[in-house]
Image (cartoon, rainbow, N blue to C red):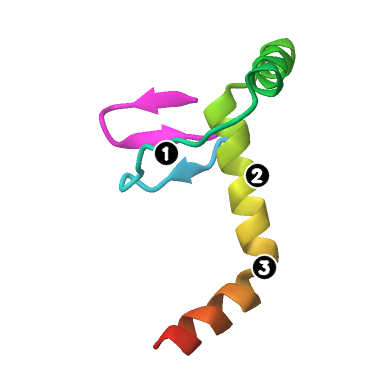
Amino acid sequence: MKTQGKNTVLNILGNKQPSASMMCSFRCDRELWEDFATLCSLQGTDKTGVLTSYIEELVNKNRDKIEAMKRLKG
């Protein structure tokens, strides 16, 4: 991930991410995480960019379900 100035962040696809980003943490098997880090290194990508791109893809594929749930919550 590259940073330009203080608030502009580019993900691995070169798309600008919102400046209102947040730090996230989660539990993961240590060996799985280390293998993921190795794979990212071999591919010349960073872990944050890969995870962010995956989350964006998953959310975009399920946008209709997300919107339906938001309507139910009011």
Image vertical order of residue 71 relative to residue 17, above or below: below
Q: Secondary structure at mark 2?
A: helix
Q: Are marks 1 and 3 in contact (CB under 8 Å)?
A: no
Q: Secondary structure at mark 3?
A: loop
Q: CA distance from mark 1 to mark 3?
A: 21 Å
Where's the C terminus, which quadrant?
bottom left
Q: Callout 1: few (<14), some (14-19), or many (20+) C-alpha neighbours within 10 Å?
A: few
| Residue 12 visible, this angle | no
Position of residue 63 measured from the top left corner of the image (x, y, whole percent): 61, 71
Q: Are marks 3 and 2 in contact (CB under 8 Å)?
A: no
Is-magenta flag for residue 13?
no
Q: Tell me what residue is drawn at x 41 percent, y 34 percent.
A: 9
User: What numbered label is drawn on residue 24?
Assistant: 1
Q: Earlier in the sequence, mark 3 or mark 2?
A: 2
Single out the mark in the foreground, 2 or 1: 1
- What is the three-letter code of the residue carrying label 2? Tyr
Q: Tell me what residue is drawn at x 31 percent, y 48 percent.
A: 20
Closest to the observer: 47 or 4? 47
Position of residue 43 measured from the top left corner of the image (x, y, whole percent): 73, 17
Q: Secondary structure at mark 1?
A: loop
Q: Which residues are magenta?
A: 1-12
User: What numbered label is drawn on residue 2?
Assistant: none
Determine the residue located farthest toward the left in the rendered image.
6
- What is the three-letter code of the residue carrying label 1? Cys
Image vertical order of residue 45 relative to residue 73, above or below: above
Disc 3: which residue: 62
Q: Are marks 2 and 1 in contact (CB under 8 Å)?
A: no
Disc 2: which residue: 54
Q: Tell me what residue is drawn at x 47 percent, y 34 percent.
A: 10
Position of residue 5 measured from the top left corner of the image (x, y, whole percent): 28, 27
Single out the mark in the foreground, 1 or 3: 1
Looking at the image, residue 3 sits to the left or right of residue 53; the answer is: left
